[in-house]
Amino acid sequence: MEQFFQQTINGISLGSIYALIALGYTMVYGIIKLINFAHSDVYMLGAYFGYVCMTSFKLGFLPSLLISMVLCTLIGVMIEKIAYKPLRNATRIAVLITAIGVSLFLEYVTMAIAGANVRSYPPQTGILDQSFNIGSINITMQQIIIVSITIILMVLLQFIVKKTRIGKAMRAVSLDSDAAELMGINVNTTISFTFAIGSALAGAAGIMVGIYYNSINPLMGMLPGLKAFVAAVFGGIGIIPGAMIGGYFIGIVEVLVSGYSNSMYRDGVVFAILILVLIIKPAGLLGKNTREKV
Amino acid sequence: MSILSVNKLTKSFGGLMAVSNVSMEINKGELVGLIGPNGAGKTTVFNLLTGIYEPSSGTITLDPNGVNRDIQGLKPHTICKIGLARTFQNIRLFKDLSVIDNVRIAMHKNVKYGLVSSFFHLPSYSKEEALLTKKSIELLKILKLDHKKDELAKNLPYGEQRHLEIARALATNPTLLLLDEPAAGMNPAETSQLTELIGWIRKEFDLTILLIEHDMSLVMKICERIYVLDYGMVIAEGTPEEIKNNKRVIEAYLGEDMNNAGD
Amino acid sequence: MKKLVRSNLAIKLVSLILTFAIIQLLIYFDIINDYLQATLATICINIILAVSLNLITGFTGQFSLGHAGFMSIGAYACALITLRIPTIPGFILGVFAGAVAAALIGGLVGLPTLRLRGDYLAIATLGMSEIIRIVFLNLDNITNGAAGLQDIPQFANWKWLFIYTAGTVLIISNYIRSSHGRACISIREDEIAAEAMGINSTKYKVIAFTIGAFFAGIAGALYATTFNFIDPKIFGFSKSIDVLVIVVLGGLGSISGSIIAAVLLGVVTTYLQSFANIQMILYSVLLIIIMIFRPQGLMGSKEVSLSIFSKLGNSFKSKKGRV
């Protein structure tokens, strides 16, 4: 039982990371129906920005987090403007291939600059290094910080989406971008803003993974990105609370599977669950099935 | 002898009753109209008949050749094979394919050669494909589309796209043909041409036809019997003359001038 | 009509023989050296993969991101057989068994997942292919796990590769010009209309998926017996993406497009090898630029055919006429 709680706590930490990445996937998909493959590389860049802040500039965790989020925001918006905007009226598969191109570009440019080898984050000191026990369950400060920052960011996101003008515009564009445009909403600005928010969250996830797992490399985004996307689909793509639930669910399942059986099977279980969910409820946990009008 | 009998057909979407308790009988060789104000559930009835939607309750029995078959809940392609074909109100051609391919696809159910023959283009392939092409061109000739057989469907003018919809439905060799607003968007001259065409193909192909139409002149002119749908229910049934003078129908259509329409 | 069919066949045969003869000569005179022969093999395998994925995604309109999974089944089946029967009959049996195994799994996976549409299907096929990879990774005593299978006998020389590639292209292009193939295409165009016209869409989706998987299995088998070594990593998600890139670059629904893209990509990658450190950067930039300026791919959905030459000829004539 204690092992179960320990694993669940580890799973919640990992799930926070997935949830943050999944939010970016789900928002972008909701608004332009694109599986933004480059998103996982924005997360990777977030980890590298944090690394540079902490090693070259000897900044603390919080300033590094903020800088990393800001830089990722800029990169996310740039990607959208340069690579996706010219393809606004092209087929979705063409945009998808472009996204794959951007993803490869970011990975290999990082590789050319920082090298292909794994780098380790500087050891954390002070509060980030502490941990405490409840019974035999060990909880680290890092885990607490990861979960709290994730929750703060999610609350902030909910506030933006539900209460602000731009949030309203985002929801309108994702429902019907043509109608939104006719109602005077600037669709391009709204799309850029969506990329900005998603990328900021991915940047936060990147640096938190850095301090949590210590090692980063230019291809580190691929698998977590894939799983975060699975999380988004699991919860119902385009639905923000769905991505959060999906992220935490995938994180917990993954940690439990590797804790209780062969860790080699954990990704297999994640994908098997995905396929089952899709077959039973194709629109995801919180999604609504839509009917094509005949 | 009835070729289609619909018994207490009901369909609800969530809480909304799109079609409720609709019963209809259509006899072999008849040309029947299905009319009603916008949103009355006419196209939903077509979608139920052709298997695109599954009915919430009720039965649909099709009797193309003396064998009764309940078709509710069957897949659209099975229903098509039993002998029911349709056109779509909002034209759903295979847009990026040629005119002749649109027709050939609809003839697919008659194709006997197998996959192996299609991989290696064996003699059975060549023989049947030649026959298929010949039949398609004949059909296109009837609808005056043969000179455009190699054009892409999306490049046809609107009226010809409607004709191609009919050609494609005929290619499935149906006994009962459902036409969903065949005259929508046509001018009076085109409509009267279409009226003639419908009458002619009905004789030529020995068809039973059920059609949805808003153009009352067309409906009153060619339909032998009419069902009127309102709020998903049949509110009247009878000959054009009876329908024109039916009080409930006039109420349902209040604002639309029924009496002038057919003259 | 009949004449046309026959002349078409003749043109195909002649162009096949010409292609074979030219490349054979180039190999003979060592212009295509051992190093380039590896490129040649990659191109052939990529053609098989791209043309078969094009049947699923380009012609039938079912977005699949799982082609590498089918490829891996063919590769492992063939490798395991040829390792035990290291003879030519063993190789032929291995390729065949790999293809059939992949087709079987393709059909089995297709049945439940092909109800999904668009991106959902893509994600489900991706998940399926990852599961296949993880299974191979964990079947230690059969597949040797992450270390992979080494010393697979090298049977697939250029002649075999050519036969299989030409066979794949011929069979799939024949198929899409048959009534069954048109049934597949009609699903891409409008699934509801296709069903209403008597096309059993589930059946034809599964058929397309099964045929596609069959040839992906062949490609995998040829990969194993060309490069002597396979491990689960080779057949990851990025391999499926690579194939999809070729299909989209060539043009969805164009077989000649897939072939041209596979050849171009093979040549470009070989050329870029001399810039090893920035090779992938150049490749990705190229990809983005092509998609921005030609999102429908090189060929769109058209095929290279004689009519293009005659059109060129006509425009040439008409220009001449004006002068």
Image (tube, coloured by chain):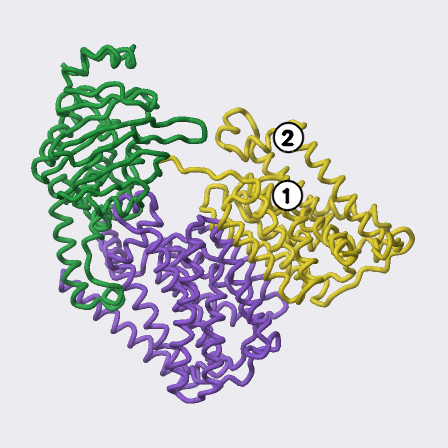
Chain colours: A yellow, B green, C purple
Tally of numbered tags: 2
Q: Which mark is residue C96?
A: none
Q: Residue at x 55, y 63 (%)?
A: C131
Q: Are marks 1 and 2 in contact (CB under 8 Å)?
A: no
Left or right of residue C92: residue A64? right
- Front position in the image: A75 or B47: B47
Other residues around mark 1 within 10 Å, as few (<14) / some (14–19) / many (≥20): some
Same chain check for tags 1 and 2? yes
Other residues around mark 2 within 10 Å, as few (<14) / some (14–19) / many (≥20): some
Amino acid type, residue under disc 1 in the picture: Val
Q: Secondary structure at mark 1?
A: helix
Q: Which residue is mark 1?
A: A77
Query: x%, y% of residue B177?
Result: 19, 37
- Front position in the image: A59 or A213: A213
* Residue A172: quadrant of the picture: top right
Position of C179 relative to B59 (above/below): below
Q: Which residue is mark 2?
A: A166
Confirm whether residue C51 shows in the render.
no
Confirm whether residue A203 shows in the render.
yes
Position of B262 relative to A22 (above/below): above
Left or right of residue B140: residue B39? right
- Front position in the image: C322 or B221: B221
Left or right of residue B14: residue B40? left
Query: x%, y% of residue A121?
Result: 81, 60
> Could you tell which of marks 1 and 2 lies nearer the N-terminus?
1
Query: x%, y% of residue B201?
Result: 11, 36
Q: Chain of mark 1?
A: A
